[in-house]
Image (cartoon, helix red, strand yellow):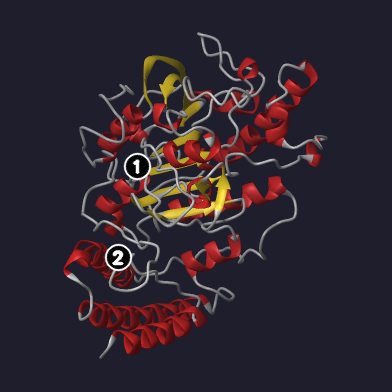
Amino acid sequence: MNQKTLRSNLASRRRFLRGLGVSIALPALASLQPRTVLGAQPAISGVATTESGAPLRMAFMSIPNGVQQDHWFPTDDFQLNSTMEPLSGLKEHFQVISGLDHINATAGRDGAGDHARASATFLTGARARKTAGNDIFVGVSVDQLAAQKVGQQTRLSSLELSSDLIRNSGSCDSGYACAYQYNLAWSSPTTPVTPEANPRLVFERLFGSGDRAERRKNYELRQKTQRSVLDFVLEEASDLQKVIGVEDRQKFDEYLTVIRDMELRLKAAETHNQLPDVDQTTPAGIPADFGDYIDLMYDMLIVAFQTDSTRVATLLLAYDGSNRTFPQIGIREGHHHLTHYQQEPELAKKVAQIDRFYIARFARFLDRMASTIDTDGNSLLHNSMIVYGGAIADGNRHSHDNLPVILAGHAGGKIKTGRFLKAPSQPMSNLFVSMLDTFGTETTQFGDSNGSLSLT
């Protein structure tokens, strides 16, 4: 088979796959035409449980544009400031941490683009390559490192959610690819894990489509379709192997890693074939009100944890740089715009109101987690580690030191809560090292870490 015929066959297969709503990208092989690399590291079995034997969960929520500094941090004796007041009834379940930095989000030699860098660095601790092309490169994110080690224990190795737009192509922030700004999870330095923004599709991924009586049948049909898609991909890989040059072997190995990962994920789904029967109706779609939208995505996360469909998740509340307005709380100026006018007291108060809006939604989520009983009689929140924050501190200065970070949950009793932890200045990656160790996926280094942060 010559290359022209091969390309024609590959194109035909891709048209079929797109018709099924599936997109598989090829690596950028010199032997063929350049394309975006899509790779993933193989999953490794591990343990993500508490001492009681209940599942241990790990989740990350990202807020945009930093916070209004004067209204954020609590007092030394953990009296909450006005922004965090909605969390006042939940103080025993979380800690506020100061002193954490993401130096790789700073400009360095790369110039403008702090919002894209912040998003890319937040969960990776790595510096994003400044490019708007296909050669994106940053690092593996903490959630995906955990998922690759423990993901085979659940039907979904991880769950990626967003309550905002999704863009993975083009340039979005001063010469940085949109993929950096709209994704939190990275399964490899070149591969963002695109979040799902439609709560209905999230629910159907977790429990199947249709009404309660139809979900099992539709779920099994979807698994058969996925198996058929994988067969097509395997055939495509076999044909590719016949024509690539020696110089492309490494990139092709990355592509094969994707396929192996797909096989592992599908086998895991088939192993965990006992679909949870939840007494919930399928969401209609994306709510018109942004607060309701966030609440619904949080609810999807709760039910995913409650049914042990996954133990690792991310939720992008809004992309960094978002200029969303908040008419529901009387703010019609854009969020990003306001952060650059905080020298005006009235506008600074509006930024704090927006910060409080996001915190109120987070408080509702934590309250529901705290009131949901887990398999060991404790709450879901007791058996979780949940990071809320971002990689920009002051939205006006685009600073990346002393970041806004909340760590909620008790990790089954392994970490201390109910405090303001004033840590010495250090990489935020040190927190991730500690979380990975607590999760049972021991590591001595992550991102730009230079140690670990004591959580006890």
Q: Residues within 10 Å of mark 1 (few under 14, many from 20)?
A: many
Image side of residue 206 versus residue 331, left or right: left
Which residue corresponds to the image point at 41% horizontal and 69% vertical from the top-left? Answer: 275
Of circles 2 and 1, which is in front? 2
- Sequence-wise first label, 2 or 1: 1
Q: Is residue 172 above or below residue 343?
A: below
Q: Three-letter amino acid code at disc 1?
A: Val
Q: Is residue 325 above or below residue 407?
A: below
Q: Residues within 10 Å of mark 2 (few under 14, many from 20)?
A: many
Placement of the N terminus among the 4 image quadrants: bottom left
Residue that label 2 marks: 258
Which residue corresponds to the image point at 56% horizontal and 15% vertical from the top-left? Answer: 74
Image side of residue 246 versus residue 100, left or right: left
Which residue is at the far top? 76
Q: Position of residue 386 (x, y in %)?
A: 44, 37
Q: Position of residue 45 (x, y in %)?
A: 21, 54
Image side of residue 152 versus residue 381, left or right: left
Compute the Cα span from label 2 to label 1.
19 Å
Quadrant hosting residue 367: top right
Q: Is residue 454 above or below residue 266?
A: above
Of residues 257 and 262, the one nearer the viewer is 257
Q: The residue tagged with tag 2: helix, strand or loop? A: helix
Residue that label 1 marks: 142
Quadrant hosting residue 174: top right
Q: Position of residue 392 (x, y in %)?
A: 53, 29
Q: Three-letter amino acid code at disc 2?
A: Val
Of residues 88 and 335, the one nearer the viewer is 335
